[in-house]
Amino acid sequence: MTLRSERLLEELAAVEHERWAHWQRYLHSRGERAADGSLVLPAELVERWERQIATPYAELSEAEKTSDREQVLRYLPVIEAVLNDTD
């Protein structure tokens, strides 16, 4: 398998969907459901996330960098498998 294969693309897309779904479950758990079905997030979380969005990786706190590294670790086994595949 090559790095540009459809199989790798699909495997990484599945990992990405799992990562996104995990984030959405967390995000939704932090909000309050309104009567109309909308989700209201606490202002302090919105403020924190907007700060993180505007901050380059190199300037994040060590804890924030660790969180990003943990997310990358979800992808590495798929990439390693491709690089080690001799077929």
Image (spheres, grey):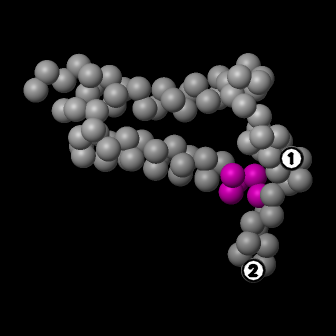
Does any portion of residue 32 appear in the rendered image? yes
- Residue name at image x 42 percent, y 42 percent: 15
Q: Nearer the viewer, residue 31 or 66?
A: 66
Does residue 62 belong to the magenta stretch? no
Q: Decide: is 69 above or below 22.
A: above
The CA distance from mark 2 to mark 1 is: 24 Å
Which portion, as a residue range, is magenta? 27-31
Q: Are marks 2 and 1 in contact (CB under 8 Å)?
A: no
Percent coordinates x, y for residue 36 in the rendering: 75, 80
Does any portion of residue 45 appear in the rendered image? no
Percent coordinates x, y for residue 25 in the rendering: 61, 52
The residue identified by callout 1 is 47
**In the image, 52: left or right of 66?**
right
The residue identified by callout 2 is 36
Percent coordinates x, y for residue 1 in the rendering: 19, 32
Q: Residue furthest bottom?
A: 36
